[in-house]
Image (spheres, coloured by chain):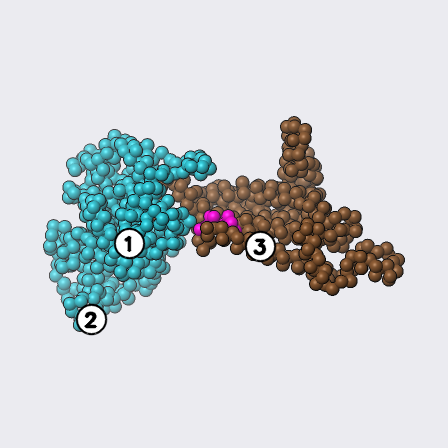
Chain colours: A cyan, B brown
Amino acid sequence: MSRDPTDAEPAGAPAGSPDDVLRVRNLTTRFFTEEGQVNAVEGVDFDVRDGEVFGIVGESGSGKSVTALSVIDLVESPGRITDGEVWYREPDLAAEFEDDVPAAVDGEFVDVRRLPEGVRRSLRGPSFSMIFQDPMSSLNPSVTVGEQIAEAVEVQRRASANPRRTRSRTQGYGLGRLLVDTLVPGRGYTSEASEARAVELLEQVGIPDPAERADEYPHQFSGGMLQRAMVAQALAGEPDVLIADEPTTALDVTIQAQILNLLRDLQAEQDTSVVMITHDLGVIARMCQRVGVMYAGQVVERGTLADVFDDPVHPYTEGLLGSIPDMDEPASRLEPIEGNVPSLLDSEMGERCYFADRCPKAMEDCLRPIPMYDAEGSDEHETRCVLAVEEYDEAAALPDGYFESEPDSASESGSADDPAAGEEVSTGD
Amino acid sequence: MAYGRFLLKRGLQGVLVVWGVVTVVFGLRFITPGNPVNAVAPLDASPELRQRIAEELGLNRPVYVQYADYIWELLHGDMGYSYISSIDASTIVLSKLPATLELAVASTVVAIVLSIPLGVVSATRRHEPADYAATSFSLVGISTPNFWLGIMLVLLLSVELNLFPTSGRAFGFYRSFELLFAEGVGAFWAAITGWLWHIALPAVTLGTYFTALVTRLTRSGMLDELGKQYVRATRAKGLPETLVRYRHALKNTLIPVVTVLGLQMGTLIGGAVITEAVFSWPGLGTTLINAINARDWPIIQGTLIVIGVGFVLVNVLVDALYAYLDPQVVE
């Protein structure tokens, strides 16, 4: 990971653990809406290691889903990734682009964001894959489940038929090919081998009578079965990184546990890295080795599971932990975090810690942009809070109602109306 | 299996609707002014003569007997005898049917060929010049009345530039094929190009509104589908964009489009009256207008029933296609 001092661009992969498969740095995604610019994701950094489950936790509207979509380059208009790097460890890809796009390559790492669009697209499926929140709406209602999984298998088969030449995989599947495949009987995008593999995958995710179920349509599946099918589809490409965006939120509690177990088993079996996005700390505790806490588009605390759960520094993390019921001490009252997620409208975001207006320990020092500080615990424990470096000082505390009197921002906190937040809120968690 | 049962159910419903149409058409005669006897009897006919004519026509029998008789005859393909035109109503109605079907199918083909690609291009290049061109076209197309467009096309392309004939049908599509077997390829070719040449303007006239409508429908449907979660999921699994757009999004867009296409085609079978009049196209519309003017009841009834049956038939076919496209309908 040597830095090349002659390159004008801030080139080179950032430092990190040698096990990293993904290093995301300063990822910034904005939505340019009619109400103004919405900073859905702002300078997010995180690493994902080989074969681990990395958790991202936060409230609805904290930018978790947009972060996930930004990593696999699926942000849609009016959203746009405005800054940041996504370094992905893939030696073959690095070798291929070493000469053409030197700024995008460092050792075994490639900055996916600097690769041509066609190449980025070709990474979806075989390299990155995603499971979505609501399985019902994430499958096409008019195509059989088996066929949809077979498509994912086919993508991977066509890609691996030519593993070393990424560019050849990006050659489009044009309208002419589609017409021929549609009109000539016995031809199609998916091959019989892919369809057979789809049935195997359905069996692998625990769907009974997979051969028959493969010919059924999504509306003939239950929610839990459908999410299993989604898992099968996401794993069909044997991805290096699987992003699971609230994979259990739309499901019954009993089914949730089954899906989580399934994910964990398959993850261990295939040694895939998983980014688990959820608002549910229980899921994080159960699945993840390391975790990042997101608030208002930023990672506010990051570390191992023990760092974040046992030794939280950021009052937001403390608040999240305080708002889950504790079975051992049922007497103690739950302590919800006061207030709402802030508006992410650029015009309404001040130059300060975004949590300060809800923070029980807000001080005068919080009225400036806060960098990431090292915190106690493991080497990896970091937090975006001044409490990591100074003690809470009653004398410097902001008076109650300080933000209500703030002229520009505090009066309107219509965060539910902004699209980035609305997207998550509407799906009902 | 489920699909076969679905089709059977729809078919039976169609038969019921046709029965309703026949009943209404039969009943119409009793609530419209004008005694059918007048059509046959001379102006100075004596009451006795009129009585005899009524008896001969079966008009003195109870209504339910007349009704049963009428249905019985219809089932045998007999729509009654037109004394005014001195011909069997079924003969004249069926001889006019091909011209109307040709026009309906031709304008639908014009509409499909133009509208779906236009709508898709418009949706996938939203807010680009191609989109603006397509939406402007559909706005103009929807707001232009048929008769005006037809007259303008005739004036410009037929009268001024002399590119197309002003009216008529020449040989029909079907008769062109008769020529193929009777007189060989040369005659067939001449006949079929003549037919195309004659049908071009009426088909464009009738198809323009239709094209505009379906373009809009395709555009908005496609935009709607492309915004759905499954499209994002399909992209996430790495499927080529061509397949995402056409195999997934377009297929779902076509479900409502097929319905509208079918319903519109149903109305075209009976509703091309104005266009047929502008181009003197010898179809059912022209026949119906003439028959109404002459109070030629058997032909009015026959035409209405054929239009009704055509409409029902098209709808059943649309339902069948709809169920094929959207598997949820079958249940």
Label 1 vs label 2, nearer the camera: 1
Circle 1 packing at 10 Å, graded few (<14), some (14-19), many (20+), is: many
Around disc 3, counting alpha carbons within 10 Å, would you say few (fewer than 14), some (14 to 19), or many (20 or more)? some
Residues in magenta, as a range = B319-327
Question: Type of residue at label 1?
Answer: Pro
Task: Using the image as rendered, state which of residue A344 and residue B188 is in the foreground.
Answer: B188
Closer to the camera in the image, B317 or A271: B317
Which amino acid lies under the numbered mark 3 shown in the image of this protein?
A: Gly
Q: Secondary structure beneath disc 1?
A: loop
Q: Secondary structure at mark 2?
A: loop
Residue A423 x, y percent position in the rendering: 34, 56
Residue of label 1: A247
Query: Mark 1 or mark 2: which comes first in sequence?
Result: 1
**Marks 3/2: CA–CA distance:** 66 Å
Q: Is residue B314 left or right of residue A314?
A: right
Counting from the top left corner in percent of width and height, residue A22 is at: 22, 43
Q: Secondary structure at mark 3?
A: helix
